[in-house]
Image (cartoon, helix red, strand yellow):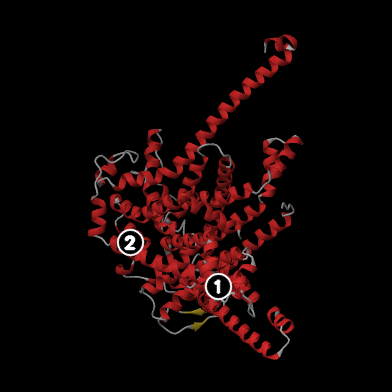
Amino acid sequence: MSVAAAATTTVPRREHVETASKADRHRVRTAFAFLAPSLLGVILFLVIPIIFVIGLSLVQWNMLTPMKWVGLSNYVNIFEFDGFGHSLVVTAYYVILNIPIQTAFALGMAMLLRSKRAGSGVIRIIAVLPFLSTPVAMGVVWNWIFNPSTGLVNQFLAHLGITGPAWLSNEATAMPVIAFANIWQYAGYNMLFFLAGLAAIPPTVYEAASIDGATKWEQFRRVTLPLLRPTMLFVLVTGVIGSFQVFDTVYVMTAGGPGNATEVASLNIYNTAFAGFRIGEASAMSVVLFAVILAITIVQFRYFNKRMTYEIA
Amino acid sequence: MTSATAAVPATAIAAGTTERTSRLDKGVRLTGFYLLLLIIALIFILPYLMSVFAAFKPLPAILSQSPLRPPAPGTLDNFKTIFTQYDFGRYLANTLLVTVILTAGQVTFSMMGAYAFARMEFPGRDSLFWLYLTTLMVPNIVTLVPLYVLFAHSHLLNTYWAIFLPYVLGVPYSVFLMRQYFMTIPKEVMEAARLDGCSEGRILWRIIVPISRPIIITATLLAFVFGWNNFMWPLIVTNSNSLNVLTVGIANFNSNFGVQWNLILAGALVALIPMVILFAIFQKHIVNSISLSGINR
């Protein structure tokens, strides 16, 4: 729009208009050429699949025999026969175990390491290393560390005279151990965002607070936390979206067991689609999971938007 | 000091004690600080250290010794076994191949898209950008089943293509990240270059890329880590051993050889060690990169 306006106003003579519009057309063509690959990717691998998954959720199909239209019955069946309700509860339990502790741990580390004291730089770097580490490979390592007989944890407990549980084959402990593995993996990563958020808080705010007689704890509650809200929102939203999809560590550490105690939503989708070849049911599960994640994300944005009243340049 | 004590003894003594207690306080605090640092460091390093120890021990030693005892003497047999009797060499090569292709494509194409959004004018730009933003938050798991069906119908299952294709054409997050960065480059820089007859490709390559190195490194690292660690998608689109990537190879190995910790941990290290090395070389970049990827959102 602005291009066309500029062309007509600045170049009044006719032949110039023609060359200008030719140049414009060339420019637009170049722009679309630059955009083409990523646009193709977004349409083929994101937009089409999202529309497609809704369609697939309304049919019964095993990928061999022809599709059969079943309407919304898949959405009933996944809760009645495939235990998807249980999967959602288990996933929510994992998220509740994971997110608060991970966020608190990340923020605590950031508060501790924000000082320029010798040594904090090294620890900052060490804490980020797990983020790069292949979750599948780390899952294997945790399997060993939490192994009831040869693992470090139970060997340590044995020194204290305690007989440790069979962590990953015990219904009560399996999910907390999986949550622990993920906290370990992503706490340092989230710490970096908190460090950046803390660095953006001007020191004058703290000076003002301490002149007013605020204790360290009050400063943290009334100054640091409110000013960290944008960072908190980012960390929580990305963390929750990621946690609701947890798969790699669960697949390697428990494969959903014992029984189906750790059969999280993504594992149920995987089993339904690629072990049972029930594409319709798996698609309905995907749609429901998407709706749940979307709803929680919207709630988080609402909650934080209401409270994002502090603005510091 | 003595004359001051003589003049105002009470306050001086009081000041002296608070100073002493505050120094003591400081000492306690500093000790506490370093104790915490030590605990944090141990939490993050111990799992690596123990796996390295175990991977260089024979199985009986792993089963009988403390995991914290270094191997004495260390043996390379576990690695020899997984590379010769099992296909870890193949998995490693496959992973490297698909990760490099995925990263190169994703960064290049995302960069081009980002440049178009940031500094070129074309009809529909804002609505297309809105489309990218909308798809940014779509969880991977939601597109998994339909993508699998599409790939099956295109006869792409069990090919190298299948593993990297969904991510190689550029992803919205990467486009968004770089677009935000390009927006901070003054328009005049590009306008001047255009007046000098520079093509858009040349502007991007010769002007934008050199001044945008931090964000390009960020996008590259994020793509590489994603490609290297990706598990679910390769797991479902490949089912032949010759096409397995490391993550899939390790998971299969884990379910087939449950108690052979020496081999399983050696296999896990084949995936972990390249990342640790990458991290050691680029640690400053990586730490800055991750912070950069958050702030820009």
Apparent side of residue A235 relative to residue A173 in the rendered image (left or right): right
Residues indicated by labels 2 and 1 sit on the same polypeptide chain: yes
Near-viewer residue (A100 or B178): B178
Q: Residue B92 carries which label?
A: 2
Apparent side of residue A150 relative to residue A102 in the rendered image (left or right): left
As shown in the figure, which amino acid type bears the numbered disc 1? Gly
The answer to whether B15 is drawn above or below residue A309 in the figure is above
Instruction: Answer with the quarter of the image where residue B228 lies.
Output: bottom left
Q: Determine the residue positioned at 44% across, 71% down.
A: A273
Apparent side of residue B233 relative to residue B23 in the rendered image (left or right): left
Q: Where is residue B23 in the image (x, y as percent from the top left)?
A: 60, 24
SS under mark 1: helix
Q: Mark 1 points at which residue?
A: B113
Instruction: Answer with the quarter of the image where residue A277 lies.
Output: bottom left
Instruction: Answer with the quarter of the image where residue A1 lies.
Output: bottom right
SS under mark 2: helix
Near-viewer residue (A86 or A2): A2
Q: Where is residue B52 in the image (x, y as percent from the top left)?
A: 33, 46
The answer to whether B190 is drawn above or below residue B262 in the figure is below
